[in-house]
Amino acid sequence: MTNRPRLEDMQRADFPMGGEPLAALDLADTLMLAAQPPVDLMDSPAASATWWALQASRLPEGPTPSLEATRTLRAAIRDVFDAHLAGRPPQDTSVEDINAAAATVPTSPRMVRSQTGTTMQTRWHTEQGGNAALAAVARETIELFASPARLATLRRCANPSCSMLFLAANKRRTWCAANVCGNRVRVARHYERTRGANSNPQITTDERHTQG
Ligand SMILES: [Zn+2]
């Protein structure tokens, strides 16, 4: 559950930011709030499923969360992060939504014996119908706020027209990703082009030119 996705793999799937230490941060960064108009990268069940698949290596196994549940948790996480950075209190409902998502899947420690020794694993109890991936992302958020030193590294990209959040393990890090804020316009255009192509199987104007 510690294998974070690689930024290049996230970008290949049209998510400009990703691969942060917490899936909760990657989730918050699927909403490009500073873009005009704001861009929601979770704009379809397919996009949401792709994002969860990219995060799967660091989350407990289980069914892919629905788009609606994903967006609800994301809104709550985005609010508590943004509120912290702005020095204001978050919405009560945001805290409640995060706690509710975490509470739907209790965990228990598990002793696992192997030839090389004994390790501890976490068992996620989905018997009551909760979604383990959502619960894990909610839990990450709670744990971040319980760790003042780590929380102090939470930052918003220094580009005023970028809303991406990240943990600055290196204190000098001020940008989300070099190839995002360096080529923001290009990324946005790429996003528009590829999303347009995905939702409409007809050939694009550019392709028409090259084929004509
Ligand atoms: Zn940025």
Image: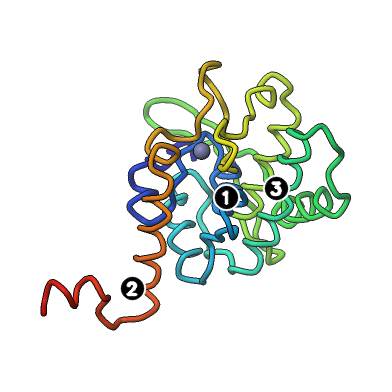
Q: Residue 118, relative to residue 39: is it above or below?
A: above
**Callout 1 crowding tier (Cα within 10 Å): few <14, some 14–19, many ≥20:** many
Q: Residue furthest bottom?
A: 202
Q: Nearer the viewer, mark 1 or mark 2?
A: 2
Determine the residue positioned at 73% across, 38% down. Answer: 142
Q: Is residue 65 above or below residue 88?
A: below
Percent coordinates x, y for residue 10 in the rendering: 39, 49
Label 2, secondary structure: give it. Answer: helix
Q: Nearer the viewer, residue 96 or 164?
A: 164
The amino acid at mark 1 is Leu
Q: Which residue is mark 3?
A: 77
Residue kind at label 3, given as amino acid type: Ile
Q: Decide: marks 1, 3 in contact (CB < 8 A)?
A: yes
SS at mark 1 in the image = helix
Residue at left offset 68%, top offset 66%? 129
Residue type beneath disc 2:
Ala
Pointer 3 local density, CA inside 10 Å: few below 14, some 14–19, many at least 20: many
Say which quadrant the C terminus sits in. Answer: bottom left
Distance from label 1 to label 2 (Cα)? 24 Å
N-term mark: 1 or 3? 1
Q: Quadrant of residue 88?
A: top right
How far apart marks 1 and 3 lie (CA) works out to 8 Å
**Location of mark 1 (residue):** 27
Q: Quadrant of residue 154?
A: top right
Frontmost residue, 97 versus 175: 175
Picture disc at residue 197: 2
